Amino acid sequence: VLKSGIIFRDIPDNFVQWVIDRSQVLQFQPDALIYEKGAAAEKFYYVISGNVALFLQEGEEQVLINNYQAGNTFGYEVLAKHALRMTYAKAEDAVLVLATPLRILQKISEQFPAFQIQFTLQLQTLALLLKKPMDWLQDDESVHYISRKHSLILIMNMLKPILLMLALLVLVGILFNASVISTSMTLWMCSILGVLGIGWSVWNAFDWRNDYFVVTNQRVVFLEKIALIYDSRKETPLS
């Protein structure tokens, strides 16, 4: 059953069975807390049946972060450097989970490095979800993966305006040496080009931070936002 999810997909069957034998089946009644934010992360969970919600508490309001159904896993903070829960987790209805202790996960990580990589990716997804909750999720929809564009795209987008302004500054220098423009005009143009280059580069960085790729159990979504201009969501269903 564990191999139905991506986390255990590449783990040999005998090792998966070893994990199951050393895990514990836990039952939670509707609205029961599975763990609290800030608690020590000591177990990793696989949902056998029922629905689990991750949320944050803001005053009297509960802000939904993600949903998990049968076949999903949660509790990825267990292998984080500072193993503390980043959210609350509660049973939405009657829930059965398979709880795997930290020491078992550490053993798997030692044997299979790709296992740790999957945990790291899921922790990054959770961190991004905390910064940008997906309030458009349906009740039976869960986020499997969320990411920004590659950091190389960020670097290229920041370098382009700077390189363009440097080229224009060279042109300004040539015009000055040819006595086409005055010293005051040269200083004025250099200042303007410098501000434009830095401002444009910073704008591109903010634009990069506002774009997300999201994979849920139902669709693939591209979220794009340009500050003060528009906010769009493009999606493709998985079925």
Image (cartoon, rainbow, N blue to C red):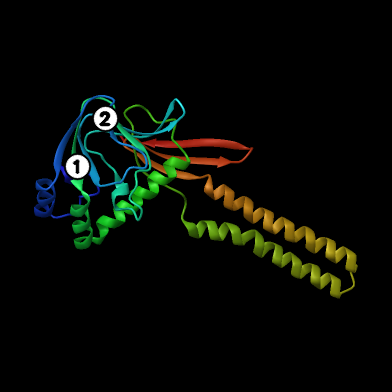
Query: Residue 118 appears at what percent x and percent y?
Result: 30, 53
Count residues near mark 1 (Cα–Cα under 10 Å), then give few for <14, some for 14-19, many for 20+: many
Q: Which residue type does callout 2 highlight?
A: Asn
Q: Which residue type does callout 1 highlight?
A: Ala
Q: Nearer the viewer, mark 1 or mark 2?
A: 1
SS at badge 1: strand
Q: 156 left or right of 52?
A: right
Q: In this view, does 115 lie above or below 91?
A: below
Please give the name of the residue rendered at 85% of the width and 71% of the height, measured from the top-left corner. 176
Query: Residue 66 appears at what percent x and percent y?
Result: 36, 35
Q: In this view, does 118 lie above or below 72?
A: below
Please give the name of the residue rendered at 75% of the width and 60% of the height, measured from the top-left corner. 193
| Residue assigned mark 2 | 51
| Residue assigned mark 1 | 99
Q: Is residue 44 above or below residue 167?
A: above
SS at badge 2: loop
